[in-house]
Image: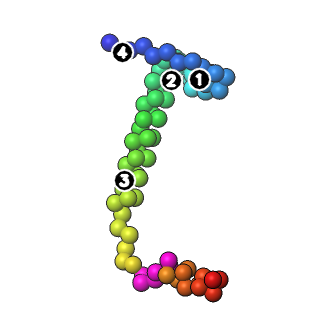
Amino acid sequence: MADTITIRGDAETEHALDVLTRDGSSRSAAIRQAVLEAALRKERAAAMRRAVLRMPLGEPDGIDIAAEIAHSREDER
């Protein structure tokens, strides 16, 4: 048996529910679907972040940006 969840709606939430139920879906079904889709988006976003973090950065190009900046600022001192 599923748990019952209560939410406090505001004008924005009520408008969103109106949009989601225009096809005849019940408010309960629309909310269930929205929660499932939001969770899927978060899982996909987390998977994409992990994939990006695992991407190889390639070989260094031999340019030390910090040293270049420090060298160019020597004249400012």
* Residue on which the image places disc 3: 50
Asked which secondary structure carries label 3, the reply is helix
Structural crowding at the residue carrying mark 2, measured as other residues with C-alpha within 10 Å and reported as few (<14), some (14–19) or many (≥20): many
The residue drawn where x is 54% and y is 81% is 70
Q: Main secondary structure of the magenta part?
A: loop
* Residue on which the image places disc 4: 2
* Residue on which the image places disc 2: 30
Please tell me which of labels 4 and 3 falls first in the chain.
Answer: 4
The nearer-to-camera label among 1 and 4 is: 4
Which image quarter holds the N terminus? Answer: top left
Q: CA distance from mark 1 to mark 4?
A: 21 Å
Quadrant of the rendered structure where residue 19 is?
top right
55 to 28, vertically: above or below: below
Q: CA distance from mark 3 to mark 1?
A: 33 Å
The residue drawn where x is 37% and y is 74% is 58
* Residue on which the image places disc 1: 17
Asked which secondary structure carries label 4, the reply is loop
